[in-house]
Structures are given as C-alpha cells and as structure tokens.
Amino acid sequence: MQRTLTKDLVGKVGEEVLVKGWVNTRRDLGKIIFLDVRDKDGLIQTVVASSASPEAYRVVQEIRSEFVVEIKGEVKKRSENTINKDLPTGEIELIAKNIEILGRSGTPPFDVTSDGREIGEDVRLKYRYLDLRRPRMQTNIKLRSDYMQALRQALLKKEFVEIETPILTKSTMEGARDFVVPSRFQPGKFYALPQSPQQYKQLLMISGFERYFQFPHCLRDEDLRADRGFEHTQLDLEMSFVTREDVMNTVEDVVKEAIQKVGGRLKDQKFPVFSYEGAMKKFGADKFDLRTDEEKENGTLAFAWVVDFPFFRPVNKEEVSDKFDSKSEWTFTHNPFSMPIPDHLDYLMRGENVDKIITTQYDLVCNGLEVGGGSIRAHKGEILKATYKIMGYSDSQIKESVGHMLEAFSFGAPPHGGIALGLDRQIALLRGEVSVKESMAFPMTSTGRTSVMDAPSQLPKEQLKELGIKIVDK
C-alpha cells in the first residue's frame, strides 16, 4: 500500500490508508489511546482502541512522543463536537488497525512542539536535528527554499546564468580575516575560503557571460556576535554593460517579485533612494527603518537604497583586518574593486582629496538592517592600481595581491557591476525573526562552535605532521 500524506487524507473518508510519521503527542484514556501523528505536511489524530484492534492496542503501549511509526487504518469523520477547527485535518481522524514502530525515541531534551524561544541556544543547536522538528523551524526552512526558488526563477527570466565558483581560493582583501586551508601537496602554502565570490564574478564578466548569479556560502573569520556566525549564504549577481541604476532596478524587480511570490508584504513598490549623507542627517545612520508602528505589527518590509558612500575611511588601528588590508592611513569602506563616481575619478587616479572621493556603492536596507550591498566595479587595471596605491601598496605588492585581475583586465573587460544580498537576513525579516540563526538549518553558536558536531576540534598529531603544521602553545 502506498503512503498517504496528511494533506491528502481529507478526501479519503471511508478509505483504508497507510500513514507514516512521528508521534507528536500521546493521550491515554484507558481503553482508547490517541496519537497525533506528524509528517512534513501536518498532523492527523489517530485513534487506537482495544476493541477495534487488540494488536494495534498492544503495540501502542510502547509508543511515546517522537517515535517513528507506520499506521494502517480507516479515515473517518469526527463527530461534530470533537472537530478541531485549528487543524486542516480537524474534521477527520484515523482509526488504527495496524501499527508498526519504525524508529524508537528516547526522551527528547526539550519540547519540540513549542516555538523553542524559551530554550537556551547551546542546547537547541546541540540537538538541532530535534529543534528543526518544531513547526516554526519547519516553516522557516521551507520558506527559505521557496524564496530561493522565487529569486532563481525571477533571475532566469531576466536571462541570468547560474554559475558556481570555487571554495578553495587565494586570500584576498575584502574587509575581514580569511579562513585558511593548508595544502598537503605544497607544504607551507595555504588556500583561503572565500569571503565572497567577488573576483570570480568579475572574471565571469570578462569571460563574456554578462549576467551571472549563484547562492554562495561565504566565510569570514570575524569577531562573533550573538546574531552572526562565521558563515552565511548570499544571493550574488553581476551584470555587464550597466550603470548603477540598471543594477538597482534589476535587483529591485527580482526582490519584489520573489517576496510577493512567497506572501511577503511590501511598504513601497518603488524603493526610495537616499544618499549616505542624507541618510546620516535624517536618521543618524545608514541603516534605518521606514515603517510605521502599524506596519511593524503586520510584518511589512520597508526596503530602501543608500548610495554615494565615501570610498575610503581612516584606518582603525584597533581593527586587525584594517591592518591586513591597508599599508597607509586609508582603507576602503566597502570594496576595493569599486569604481568612484565619474566626477571623482581624477581624485582617485591622482591620490588626492581621498576623504572626498565618493564610490558607486549602493546598499539595500530593510527594516533598519542592511540586507545587501554592491557597486559598479573598476574594470581597468590602472583604476584598481590607483585604489591600492592610496592604501599604501607598492607595485610589487599590488602584483602579488591582484596581479591576476590586472592581467585579466588587459584582455578586454566590459563595464560591470553587481550586488550581494544576505539571504539569511531576508528570510529572518520575512518571518519576523530577530536572529538570522532562525533562518538557517545548522548555524553556529555565538561562541563559534558548530551545530551538533563538535567543531572546531583538534587534529591527530599524524595529520598535523603530514600537513607540516606544528601547534605552538601560547
């Protein structure tokens, strides 16, 4: 007999069906035991009566919450006074004829039927596979999948090509420390895990694809916060032969279509645009919330653009990544691969009025948070070199850092620009979640430990020796 999912049971009154799932709750009334059985689509109340099936009644004595079961039985209408109007299957129930235990469960460390907010993060993430069973988390992760598909379809309609870029790459300057991976074949040398696909997507524009996107995993060895881990997922895209407005309009179209497809509520069909200077004067920050109190209550999403950022800022001597990225008193605010606005290109090329140079950077903000950022890129070698010169790099240091990009530009690079949108943050906003961790299947803890698995962990001495690595005690 084929399995029937709970969503299909309503139309099978009077039929015998096979249901498989987890026991959500168990209620023992003596000669009758009720099991609420849960599958990926919902719940069905199952009645196990000693008079109807002595064998099923015998088996059910062993069953507890979170057991995995297979139940054969007949779908029947409930009596009028027992209908549960809160459930899609609330007008029916399953009268068990046969039960098989497919998987036994110990007592869970917490209740998986609550929303889980009362449970500490460390416990939830240690048992994340159980935490994900709760309805709120099931809804969050399914929404993530639906939203990604909606974004993908919107981009494909606009003739974007989905292309994956490497995970093992070269250490680059992108505003955070890199995670590094030792090379066994070349002792003493290391790969870096990508902070973003920035250089690869520019190389794809030089390759002639013109419109690229992917959903990359990005890894940054940043100082941890309660709402930030070492890795995140973003929607990354790049376009050739475009202006800043072309990219912003395309992204706006794609985001609006995807959000509306998954049932999100937008404040504005046309996202307002603020200059960085104007936003700072009006809101005191470049991330701001445009919603009314009523719109906050009903889950409205208020998107806006911020443009015309300073290209450079003074180095923060307390920030380690600034020391890595800059060899002068200046470092970039967003991205060293950006293009200045046309009126300030001469400033950049001459290394003058550095504090006045405005970049073509554009940030997308929503409900007081940054959800994306991008720019028109430098597509000529001399422009990229001028940026590095301002940051104090010598010609040899520039060649060592981005020589491959300079060489690529020498073979005909089109004007191009793009953006990276934080997928985890957007899902959290769509669901009204405070933390992005509620939108991720297996996030890290706030102390940088992985969900479920015990990492970071030590390596055996033999493996360290093979890699040519020696651990030095501090």
Image (cartoon, grey):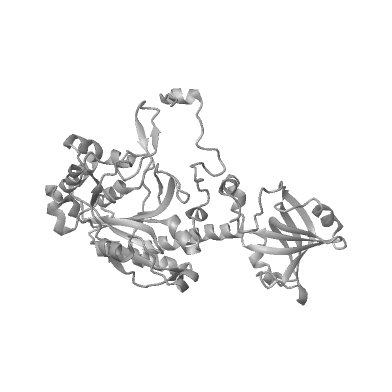
82 or 314, which is in the foreground?
A: 314
Answer above or below: position of 474 versus 2: above
Q: Can residue 336 be seen in this view?
A: no
Residue 272 on image: x %, y %: 32, 69
Residue 54 on image: x %, y %: 86, 57
383 or 22, which is in the foreground?
A: 383
Image quadrant in which you'd find residue 134:
bottom right
Residue 216 on image: x %, y %: 40, 50
* Residue found at x 72% / y 70%: 92
Q: Is residue 130 visible?
A: yes
Answer above or below: position of 192 versus 296: above
Q: Quadrant of the N terminus?
A: bottom right
Decide if residue 271 is on the left or right side of residue 121: left
Answer above or below: position of 144 versus 313: below
* Residue found at x 17% / y 42%: 389
* Residue found at x 25% / y 62%: 277
Answer above or below: position of 393 versus 113: above
294 or 405, which is in the foreground?
A: 294
Image quadrant in which you'd find residue 21:
bottom right
Residue 402 on image: x %, y %: 24, 41
Decide if residue 241 is on the left or right side of residue 161: left
Decide if residue 244 is on the left or right side of residue 220: left
